[in-house]
Image (cartoon, rainbow, N blue to C red):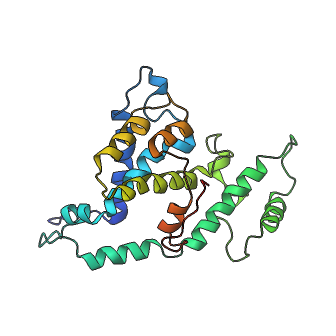
Amino acid sequence: GAAGEPTLLSLDDARTLFHEFGHGLHGLLSNVTYKRLSGTQVLRDFVELPSQIFEHWITEPVVLQRHARHWQTDAPMPLDLMQRMQRASQFNQGFETVRYTASALVDMAVHSLTDAEPPADLCAFETDVLRELGLPHGVGLNHRLVHFQHLFASAGYAAGYYVYLWAEVLDADGYDAFVEAGSPFDAAVAQRLLKHVYSAGNTVEPKAAYVAFRGREARVEPLLRKRGLLVEGVDAKEPA
């Protein structure tokens, strides 16, 4: 803040704080024997679950009313502002979801090539893949292959750009366990989350760890509802 003014956090700042604290908890609560299996030493498409699921608590009304207080009057955040924030979070999500998914699928396509040499024309290859996918022309990609540093600056995200969205599937479905229990602070659900996710590190195969916590495989419907892409109350009967 300016001289004499407080330093304030935006909602994005606060969400980042909760996100990184989730990573911190993943390390602090780790209860394994070997360091190479501890905390965040898990597969990349599972490492963001402990951090992203923790973000959900920042928008819980009871949390906002306790901590999101006006810096001058100390008044809690009004309920109507919370509702407006929730509606705003679903703005443009159809576009954003398709755009991200297109980039992830192009990533998988280019890394599925069996020839030693890359395509002579990456832009033409990209266009062909998107045509086969049926991507609407007006949507486009988050990243074009010719400058997709996530994929080519290192091997870290090669054939792995999907992990951000997959982690959102897991965190939305995982947080629904608290919703189904009737409280974001349900002790039994929290204990399962601690035992099977936060403390287990990489001692358990990620899918098995998630099923032990949730009681079933992850479903995509909670993420679609969170993004406003599924009518409330509509759910699939089988795991995605």
Q: Residue furthest top?
A: 33
Q: Is 138 drawn above or below residue 212 in the view shown?
A: below
Position of residue 200 in the picture relative to residue 184 (left or right): right
Q: Is residue 1 left or right of residue 83?
A: left
**Residue 136 versus residue 116 in the image, above or below:** below
The residue sitting at 52% across, 74% down in the picture is: 231
Question: Nearest the camera: 164 or 71?
Answer: 164
Above or below, 203 against 82 in this view is: above
The N terminus, quarter of image: bottom left
- How many numbered markers are drawn? 0
Where's residue 45, x and y in %? 56, 44
Seen at 55% across and 33% down, the residue is 205
The part of the image, by quadrant, that contains residue 165 is bottom right
- 155 horizontally vs 79: left or right: right
What's the residue at 86%, 40% (across, down)?
Answer: 116
Estimate the x, y position of residue 218 in percent, counting from the top left: 54, 51
Picture quarter with the C terminus: bottom right
At 77% from the left and 70% from the top, the residue drawn is 134
Near-viewer residue (126 or 163) = 163
Evaluate whether residue 43 shows in this view: no
Residue 235's x, y, as percent?
A: 54, 65
Give the residue furthest to the front.
237
Residue positioned most to the left: 73
Q: Nearer the viewer, residue 61 or 12?
A: 61
Res. 44 image quadrant:
top right
Residue 185 x/y as whole percent:
28, 52
Judge whether residue 119 can be spotted in this image.
yes
